[in-house]
Image (cartoon, rainbow, N blue to C red):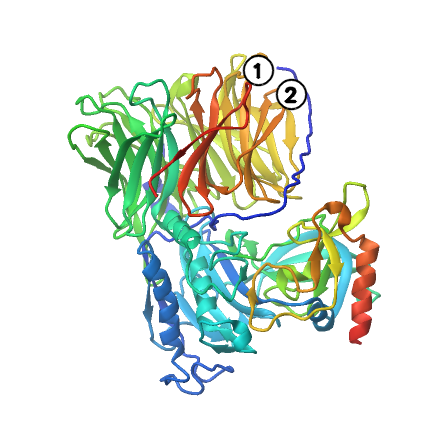
């Protein structure tokens, strides 16, 4: 392969519009969070409880108002619930440790630091990087005057609406970050007209706490095009699985895969495990009531034959409750790697304990014990992506992209699911945070294409590494206005003899999803922008040549901004039409 | 091969926790920025480090800036260090959602509420008091908002009482459609100084 360094800067010119919900990257394992309410009756200029916790019609108890704020979330979705405990003094104001009870209270400092003259409230959430939340406090600044009203703030000069701020802060507690548009209670600027969770907020809440992802699926109806699977939680908490034909949009499967109380994490399409003539769909989920990870398997069509495979459950005391010491994230099909006649399923996740940053657990899909495997993957690092090397002729070998949260850098670890545990660590750029990666074969060697964000200036960059650790052709760097989302490697699409890859990015100037395509020798770079009115919603994958035009496609899960309708758009990565080629809408 | 359970049994329980904050901030205006800040400077972030804060479990990130120009406050300072709540220390982290630390090498104009006092966020109005200095397409040093929008004007205005923001733009900051319309660094400084003098 020709070695060459290339640098590319791309600039976005379209004015800003909107962006759908964004997440903080971690979530609570349980679906209910208990919050203790502190006693603030003796401090602050607080119109809700002036000197008395009892409150009255004119100056209601703030704890009634906080319940009102939480009920606004509860009335919008049941995926995540808050409960309150009014035990005064149960919390330790100013204590920033994660084992303190979740609390909400008024104070004049945060962890010993001054609020400053402009800060109204902060929400603190302790979490394991890239994995789960552990603890939250919401602290309101006693220096402001607080009231409760639903009309415009201009009608109440000098008085802050407590409920509006509380709804926003507890949205953060549930995992929501700030979108870049104003049609959300989680917006960076809270408008007078919005005091309730909006559709975009609810979609985000459901996705973060119940699951939202899409995957490519083999051609089930034999019409020559691949299908697309979308898994998501609805506002009742049910996890819905839907498969549609990528060309016709026809619904091939639509069912409630899990009842309320599960958080869906990943899915794979299996072979016809029960030999009844229908392929099987396996979805990994965490049961929120007891933190049991399990895989549920169902026929795609035909008679119902639901099976489940329980994976390791490891629950430990933490603070006033229990947490799972492992956080499953990915599900992979290893085929029958150990030759016992049953498909092997691998669950890869993070460990919350310091000695093992990640873990891999392998079990038979038919529930038989088989040759079970469970091993840790290094410490002080979190898995952010997994590829099987089946396409490279190594079905039971895993490539795991790890994020070292101590340094902010990443590496890829190659591990065998069975047999000798040969560890190969491939160092990536030491000053870039890894986002996503893919594997490919080129000139008889195995390679990694990875997407990262430079720590120094936030630039998105794409680099190549051979699995022997040798650097590839160089690096592509984008303008800082691009946010990295995902990357896929393709076979040679433009016929120049080089493998192609496609990076999916968000252009922050207008929040449109875009795709950068280049050869592995970093030539023939093309840039395609997805249509306006949609925002990236989490999954990016190869769709193959679904329309049979001779060129592979890259698909992106999107959300229509106007109404939150889920969709998957795909585009050719080469050929005569490199813009959006097709889209599939899913059931609202 | 070591099993995960074996690791868990023999491991010391070193939780690698981090903490995230989210915040609600009052919408401020340019007049508030110039009046309520005791130090306004143009500078560049040089280095950062984390240390334990005063409360149990607290972590702070300190960012040291070189000072190129002082628009308000002590003109003798060539370097300043600002304290932000949050960071990663000894395997434990503390993150403030909505609080974006300046990247090393970032050049900007910063409105510091009270120099030397540890606050959740050192800038008044958080990102509303943070302006980035970048070269525009013509190679001219120009001023942009924290979210990279070109600043076309810095006019006198106070914030709207009761309105809540986390990462918006200060009232009185006018945004241009094109980078070429952004105020030059010199023009921006001139307007800030004029407002500072108006308030004194």
Residue appearing at x 56%, y 58% in the figure: B86
Nearer to us in this view, A486 or B162: B162
Q: Is residue B25 left or right of residue B146?
A: left
Above or below, A232 against A125 in this view is above
The residue that label 2 is drawn on is A523
Q: Is residue A496 left or right of residue A488?
A: right
Q: Is residue B183 left or right of residue B175?
A: right
The residue that label 1 is drawn on is A498
Q: Are marks 2 and 1 in contact (CB under 8 Å)?
A: yes
- Return the x and y of residue B87 as percentages of the image width and height: 57, 55
Q: Earlier in the sequence, mark 2 or mark 1?
A: 1
Above or below, A347 against A2 in this view is below
Alpha carbon separation for disc pair 2 and 1: 9 Å
Residue appearing at x 34%, y 43% in the figure: A588
Q: Quadrant of the N terminus of chain A?
A: top right
Dot 2: what SS?
loop
Residue appearing at x 76%, y 51% in the figure: B182
Nearer to us in this view, B82 or A299: A299
- Return the x and y of residue A517 as percentages of the image width and height: 57, 26
């Amino acid at each position: 392969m020709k070695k060459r360094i290339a640098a590319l800067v791309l600039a976005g010119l379209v004015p800003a519009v909107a962006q759908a919900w964004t997440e903080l990257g971690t979530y609570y394992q349980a679906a209910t969070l208990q919050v203790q309410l502190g006693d603030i009756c003796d401090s602050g200029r607080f119109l809700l409880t002036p000197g008395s916790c009892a409150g009255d019609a004119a100056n209601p108890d703030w704890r009634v108002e906080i319940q009102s704020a939480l009920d606004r979330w509860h009335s919008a979705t049941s995926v995540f619930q808050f409960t309150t405990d009014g035990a005064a003094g149960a919390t330790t104001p100013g204590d920033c440790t994660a084992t303190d009870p979740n609390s909400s209270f008024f104070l004049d400092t945060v962890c010993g630091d001054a609020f400053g003259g402009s800060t109204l409230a902060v929400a603190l959430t302790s979490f394991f990087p890239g994995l789960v939340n552990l603890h939250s406090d919401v602290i309101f600044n006693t220096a402001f005057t607080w009231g409760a009203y639903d009309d415009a703030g201009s009608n109440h000069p000098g008085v802050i609406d407590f409920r509006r701020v509380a709804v926003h802060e507890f949205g953060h507690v549930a995992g929501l970050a700030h979108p870049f548009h104003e049609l959300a209670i989680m917006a960076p600027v809270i408008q007078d007209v919005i005091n309730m969770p909006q559709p975009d907020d609810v979609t985000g809440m459901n996705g973060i706490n119940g699951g939202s992802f899409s995957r490519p699926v083999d051609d089930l109806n034999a019409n020559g095009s691949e299908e697309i699977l979308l898994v998501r939680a609805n506002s009742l908490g049910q996890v819905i699985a839907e498969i549609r034909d990528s060309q016709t949009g026809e619904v091939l499967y639509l069912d409630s895969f899990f009842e309320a109380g599960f958080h869906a994490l990943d899915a794979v399409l299996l072979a016809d495990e029960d030999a009844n003539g229908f392929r099987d769909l396996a979805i990994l989920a965490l049961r929120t009531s007891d933190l049991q990870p399990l895989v549920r398997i169902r026929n795609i069509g035909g008679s119902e034959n639901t099976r489940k495979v329980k994976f390791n459950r490891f629950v430990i005391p933490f603070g006033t409750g229990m947490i799972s010491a492992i956080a499953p994230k990915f599900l992979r099909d290893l085929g029958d790697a150990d030759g016992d006649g049953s498909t092997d399923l691998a669950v890869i996740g993070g460990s919350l304990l310091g000695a093992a940053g990640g873990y891999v657990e392998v079990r038979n899909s038919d529930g038989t014990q088989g040759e079970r495997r469970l091993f840790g993957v290094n410490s002080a690092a979190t898995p952010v992506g997994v590829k099987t090397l089946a396409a490279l002729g190594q079905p039971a070998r895993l490539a795991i992209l790890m994020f070292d949260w101590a340094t902010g850098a990443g590496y890829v670890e190659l591990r065998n699911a069975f047999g000798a545990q040969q560890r190969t660590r491939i160092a990536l750029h030491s000053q870039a945070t890894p986002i996503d990666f893919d594997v490919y074969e080129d000139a008889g060697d195995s390679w990694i294409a990875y997407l990262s964000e430079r720590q120094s200036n936030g630039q998105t960059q794409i680099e190549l590494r051979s699995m022997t650790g040798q650097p590839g052709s160089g690096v592509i760097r984008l303008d800082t206005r691009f946010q990295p989302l995902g990357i896929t490697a393709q076979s040679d699409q433009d016929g120049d003899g080089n493998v192609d890859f496609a990076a999916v990015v968000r252009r922050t100037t207008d929040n449109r999803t875009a795709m950068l395509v280049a050869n592995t020798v970093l030539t023939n770079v093309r840039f395609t922008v997805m249509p306006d009115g949609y925002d990236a919603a989490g999954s990016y994958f190869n769709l193959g040549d679904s329309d049979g035009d001779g060129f592979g496609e890259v698909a992106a899960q999107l959300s229509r901004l106007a109404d939150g309708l889920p969709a998957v758009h795909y585009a050719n990565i080469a050929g005569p039409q490199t813009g959006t080629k097709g889209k599939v809408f899913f059931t609202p | 091969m070591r099993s995960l359970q074996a690791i868990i049994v023999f491991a010391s329980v070193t939780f690698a926790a981090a903490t995230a904050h989210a915040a609600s901030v009052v919408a401020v205006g340019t007049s508030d920025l110039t009046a309520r800040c005791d130090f306004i400077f143009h500078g560049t972030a040089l280095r950062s480090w984390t240390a334990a804060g005063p409360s149990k479990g607290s972590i702070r990130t300190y960012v040291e800036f070189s000072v190129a120009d002082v628009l308000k406050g002590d003109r003798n300072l060539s370097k300043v260090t600002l304290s932000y709540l949050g960071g990663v220390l000894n395997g434990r982290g503390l993150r403030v959602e909505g609080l974006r630390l300046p990247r090393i090498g970032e050049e900007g104009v910063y409105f510091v509420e009270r120099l030397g006092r540890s606050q959740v966020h050192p800038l008044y109005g958080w990102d509303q008091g943070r302006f980035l200095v970048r070269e525009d397409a013509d190679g001219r040093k120009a001023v942009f908002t924290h979210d990279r929008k070109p600043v076309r004007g810095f006019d006198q205005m106070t914030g709207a009482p009761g309105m809540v923001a986390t990462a918006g733009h200060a009232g009185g900051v006018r945004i241009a459609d094109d980078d070429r319309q952004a105020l030059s660094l010199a023009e921006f400084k001139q307007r800030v100084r004029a407002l500072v003098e108006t308030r004194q």
